[in-house]
Image (cartoon, grey):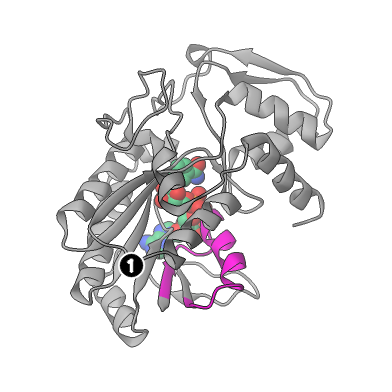
């Protein structure tokens, strides 16, 4: 099978590249940027004609969409750009996939939910995003479900890896400076190591033919606040700065975020017999890789 990956130089795409080395399938890694020494085919997902051309020339069977507008804060002021990448571009990919009976595996987010509950969120829960990022991602999900494309949507949360920009890297660089950090403890969710999510996506790629439109939830196991997550980053990294819990109200941001966004992963675990790692074990593995310079 021929598998086209978009946004493949981002956090998730980079982890997929590593796992693809052991896959029997042929992968085409695309992005709008390039990294030194990393083979990347240029593909802008907002350009439908280019997607059609590459899908046809590479005889693509599955598209994995790792590209997105992911800056939750900036999205509040760059609504058009967020809409273009998280909504219209998903429509483009779905249209291109459907026209050649390819399937689309698309990544979405826990931020499509309001986070007012206190129990792990199932796939059939009613979305009610609080900010622009979540709203545009939800619009992308809806466009995909309305299309004739065979698809799987995987909603994930709090993604981190040794690559790109993420909470773990930001915390480690602030902690290195030794100053006291305030981190919110009234937002609960679960971190997801991008390598674990990439492994789950590989199960889907290698699994039975994708039919219809299915949504799955995926994060690592457990439930934690950003404060607990930060403390674990500090401990596992061996830094001795002070981390102080604070309330969301003490740390004003442009984007409103869900207070509780732990995802219920029962469905994906059942469908693909997945054993999902505990978040802290995965964090330790990621930090080991970071300390080893990857
Ligand atoms: N990060 C999180 O905490 C989180 C949480 C929940 C869900 N998700 C979802 O998980 C998925 C993967 O996230 P990630 O953190 O791996 O993202 P990421 O690191 O930001 O990677 C996205 C990649 O897409 C590229 N890209 C941007 N515009 C593009 C375009 N027009 N055409 C093609 N590629 C384009 C980016 O390039 P540039 O860097 O040059 O812009 C980047 O290489 C996304 O769907 C995201 O919404 C993420």
Residue 250 visible somewhere in the drawing: yes
Q: Per the image, is 215 magenta?
A: no
Q: Which sits in the foreground, 121 or 140? A: 121
Q: Residue shown at 64%/28% (left/top)? A: 229
Q: Which sits in the foreground, 251 or 281? A: 281
Q: Which sits in the foreground, 37 or 102? A: 102
Q: What stretch is highlighted in magenta?
A: 3-27
Judged left or right of residue 46, residue 239 is: right
Identify the image quadrant of the N terminus.
Answer: bottom left
- Please say if 294 is above or below 286: below
Judged left or right of residue 266, residue 160 is: right
Q: Residue shown at 67%/35% (left/top)? A: 280
Residue 177 visible somewhere in the drawing: no
**How many marks on residues?**
1
Q: Which sits in the foreground, 275 or 143? A: 275
Identify the image quadrant of the C terminus.
Answer: bottom right
| Residue lying furthest bottom | 57
Judged left or right of residue 180, residue 87 is: left
Q: Residue shown at 24%/76% (left/top)? A: 49
- Please say if 5 is above or below 280: below
Residue topped by disc 1: 209
x and y percent of residue 230 in the render? Answer: 67, 28
x and y percent of residue 290 in the render? Answer: 75, 50
């Amino acid at each position: 099978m021929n598998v086209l990956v978009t946004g493949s130089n981002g956090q998730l795409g980079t982890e997929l590249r590593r796992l693809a080395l052991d896959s029997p399938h042929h992968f085409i890694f695309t992005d709008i940027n390039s990294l030194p020494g990393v083979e990347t085919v240029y593909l802008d997902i907002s350009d439908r004609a280019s997607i059609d051309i590459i899908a046809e020339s590479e005889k693509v069977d599955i598209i994995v969409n790792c590209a997105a507008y992911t800056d939750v804060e900036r999205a509040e002021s760059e609504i058009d750009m967020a809409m273009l990448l998280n909504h219209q571009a998903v429509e483009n990919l779905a249209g291109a996939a459907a026209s050649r009976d390819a399937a689309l595996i698309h990544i979405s987010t826990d931020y499509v939910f309001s986070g007012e509950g206190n129990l792990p969120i199932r796939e059939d829960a009613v979305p009610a995003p609080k900010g622009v990022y979540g709203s545009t991602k939800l619009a992308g999900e809806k466009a995909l479900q309305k299309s004739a494309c065979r698809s799987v949507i995987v909603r994930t949360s709090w993604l981190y890896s040794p690559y790109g920009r993420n909470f773990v890297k930001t915390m480690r660089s602030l902690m290195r400076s030794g100053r006291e950090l305030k981190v919110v403890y009234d937002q609960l969710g679960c971190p997801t190591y991008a390598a674990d999510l990439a492994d789950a996506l590989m199960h889907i790629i290698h699994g039975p033919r994708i039919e219809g439109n299915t949504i799955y939830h995926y994060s690592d196991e457990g439930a934690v606040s950003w404060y607990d997550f930060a403390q674990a980053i500090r401990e596992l990294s061996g830094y001795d700065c002070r981390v102080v819990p604070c309330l969301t109200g003490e740390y004003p941001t442009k984007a409103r975020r869900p207070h509780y966004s732990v995802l219920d992963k029962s469905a994906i675990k059942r469908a693909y017999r997945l054993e999902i790692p505990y978040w802290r074990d995965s964090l330790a593995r990621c930090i080991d890789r970071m300390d080893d310079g990857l």
